[in-house]
Amino acid sequence: MALTRTKSRRIVVNDSTLRDGEQAPGVAFDTDEKVAIALALEHAGVDEIEAGVAAMGPSEIDSLALIGAALSEAEAIAWCRTMEKDIDAAVRTGLRRVHVSVPLSDTQIAAKLGCTFEEALARLDRVVRYACAQGFRVSVGGEDASRTPVDRVIRAIHAAEKSGAHRFRFADTLGVLEPFGTYSIFRRLRANTDLELEFHGHDDLGLATANTLAAVRGGCAHVSVCVLGLGERAGNAALEEVVTALALLAGRRTGVRPERLASLARLVSAAACRPIPDGKAIVGGSAFTHESGIHVAGLLRDPTTYESLMPERFGRTRRIVLGKHSGRAAVAHALGILGVASDRISMPVLLERVRARAVATKRIVTGDDLLALVADADRTNPPPVMT
């Protein structure tokens, strides 16, 4: 029954770019950037924004307060450790929601709390109740849950619910899960609780997006993501990948507007001083760019031959470029755009020169390059004189 109810709801997107994303090595947002990113996330339709760690001090508290005041639809959340002093710092932000994280694996409990699992649960109960008493709506995160026996995770979920939390986040903190295992775990969790479940995946094995989709299929209705997959080490599940794949592959709805993902990615990229890889899914420069002759010939007849995603849906345009693997259809298409009649020159000759230029320069052949090649061909192969 719980699984059926979950499938009837749309997926809630919790973006952690301003918290976990900023923990990526060398990334540091100033307050203006944080507010701008928060507003862009809201504009894109993100439901919740994990905006920072209040315990970092006065400047972070001020940033959290400004973010909360700037938002009108998305909800800002302060991230806290399992400590009353973190809750006290969050009170000073003026926000009404906190996320309380507790380590669950033996390794992390010993290293971070120096206590037993039972004592960690008691501490969680105390801090969540304290946060609720301060008027906060509280979610709980099970740090390193993926390296914790599932029965222990279920106990932590029950403890979180009993203490007043409205949601439990299962964190694959070290990115060690695979999709089949993730699905099985969430089927079991969903069968043992009606509490809201969220998945937070790291990308150490390149599986964060796949694991997030598997968690949703298993019964999770809340996803924790970051723009561009920004985050510690190899990063987190990428917002743009998760919401697009949920719609295309799982038929699950989110509030995110796909046409706003590219501008959001550019904003975060600039603030993080991390260029968007050209081949990045959804928002990369080459995501809707085609060179291969076979592909282009098909695309020019029917775009769906080689595109499962329509670029217009993402506020982008399709690009057909010339290079080593281009064919006659692509060259003729490029000539048409330039207003050059394709019968001015022998197409095999021009195609050979296009491919040679691409190999020599190690880049695409631009419109100016093509015009130069046409002009050169005209000089070396002038049309016959009619007498």
Image (tube, rainbow, N blue to C red):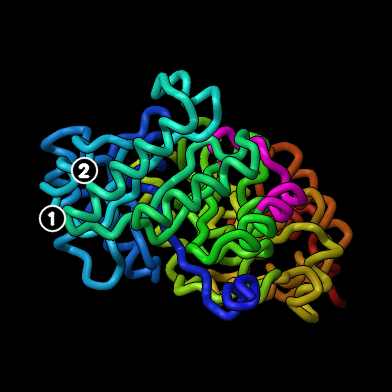
Q: Which secondary structure, mark 1?
A: loop
Q: State the residue in front, 341 or 216.
A: 216
x then y, percent, for residue 37: 30, 55
Magenta residues (range): 172-185
> Residue, x 39% and y 61% (percent of image)?
166
Asked if the stretch drawn in magenta spans residue 383, the answer is: no
Residue that numbered label 2 is attached to: 87
Residue 338 relative to residue 31: left or right: right
| 106, 314: nearer the viewer | 106
Q: CA distance from mark 1 to mark 2?
A: 11 Å
Placement of the C terminus among the 4 image quadrants: bottom right
Q: Is residue 173 magenta?
A: yes
In the image, which disc is placed on residue 214?
none
The reply, left or right, for residue 101 in relation to residue 1 is left
Of badges 1 and 2, nearer the viewer stands 2
Report the disc number at residue 94: 1
| Image side of residue 380 versus residue 193, left or right | right
The picture places residue 150, in percent across and down from the top left corner, at: 64, 43
